[in-house]
Amino acid sequence: MTTSTDGSLPHTATEAHIELTEAYAAHNYHPLRVVLESGEGAWVTDVEGRRYLDCLAGYSALNFGHSHPRLVKRAQEQLGRLTLTSRAFYHDQLGPFARDLARLTGKEMILPMNSGAEAVETAIKVARKWGYLVKGVPENQATIVAMEGNFHGRTTTIVSFSTDPVATAHYAPYTPGFRLVPYGDIAALEAAIDDSTVAVLLEPIQGEGGVVIPPDGYLQQVRTLCNATRVLMMADEIQSGLARTGRTFACDHEQVVPDVYILGKALGGGVLPVSAITADGDVLEVITPGSHGSTFGGNPLAAAIGREVVAMLNTGEFQERAETLGRRLADGLGGLVGHGVTEVRARGLWAGVDIDPELSTGRDVCERLLDHGVLAKEAHGQTVRLAPPLVASEDDVDLLVEAFRQVCSG
Ligand SMILES: *Cc1c(COP(=O)(O)O)cnc(C)c1O
């Protein structure tokens, strides 16, 4: 217990930290009332010493868990050596990282950035420029087709094609050049593509939308349509990629290879923001010196960690864990349908659980999960998204299912 300076009632360390944060940090989030202090693997500890199973995992930025020894070791080595050069000079970390990430994605080149939104912006710029210089779309006419219910980040251009009113309200004027179609509807997509279309931008699974999985065969149909119309297929795998779904990429479930992979989140190993797009030379060569850039993109520390992440993914162990644990999670959650849960959508260690509106809201379930030592976050009103770190144990998954069962039955 700490005593407030104004002599009012003593309050807990948790309350004190929340008050301070709310007083000085803008309210762009509505966090659960828990103040975290340390983390290891799938578990975190709060300032009162209570432990929680982290089932959000930084929106999948923490696929490898908190403080993974391999990533911490690599970060510490690089911290003592060289962290930032800018791209005005070469450094010894970018080449190896770029080669290894390009190979992981089966592409020829990468373009490194920092946040996920920046990688999406980069993909949009590359697609438009490719459209004008390679496809021959008349200047200023390029259109990109995106999906209803999408989440691609928070920049002014990206929110211009969001269908979430909370994300878009009062940020106008919006960037033109985007068309929206219902997710999973191939006929609508076909109808939206014309000679001005340069790209289709989609999440192979809509994460923020509530872990929405498109109909079987949809990604293949998109691939075929993009080939036929000479349109770039751009897969935003920022949340779905890097082992989360049991494969390296969510597109792998349909043996689909997009023209552009958009990566972020887990690419930085939960240590720092690292994002990139990867594509073949015939697409990425439209980028010339000075036409795009970032002070921090591809910096030595980011490249060192990104390369370590790629090396960890190359072992296949995390993909395998996601699949095995995911089956256990889906089986466990499946048993709750009809008992406070209306639907479960799962792929790998990633699940969207729809809460029966008669029972409560997603937010309410997350608040009650907190009391059971489980951290989770609602995706949309009625959906709780579960994405524990892939280093979680079988027991952790069982604990999560049991906590969910108790919350839903009471
Ligand atoms: C999180 C996310 C982004 C944005 O990434 P930031 O690092 O928050 O800018 C973009 N697309 C998808 C699919 C995401 O999940």
Image: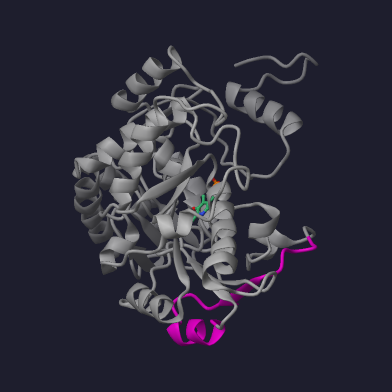
Can residue 375 be seen by looking at this rendering?
A: no
Q: Nearer the viewer, residue 125 or 358?
A: 125
Q: Quadrant of residue 21?
A: top right
Q: Residue at 53% across / 87% down in the picture?
A: 191
Give the residue at x 57% y 49%.
117
Q: Which quadrant would the N terminus be assigned to in this image?
A: top right
Report x, y in % for residue 147.
53, 71
Relative side of 279 to 326, left or right: right
Count of marks placed on residues: 0
Look at 52% across and 61% down and name the residue there: 360
Q: Which residues are magenta?
A: 172-193
Point out residue 90 in the picture as x, y percentages from the top left corner: 47, 27
Q: Residue 396 lies in magenta, yes or no?
A: no
State the residue in front, 129 or 168. Answer: 129
Depth order, front residue of 332/126: 126
Residue 364 percent location from the top left of the image: 53, 53
| Residue 36 in the figure: left or right of residue 215 | right
- Residue at left offset 58%, top offset 43%: 289
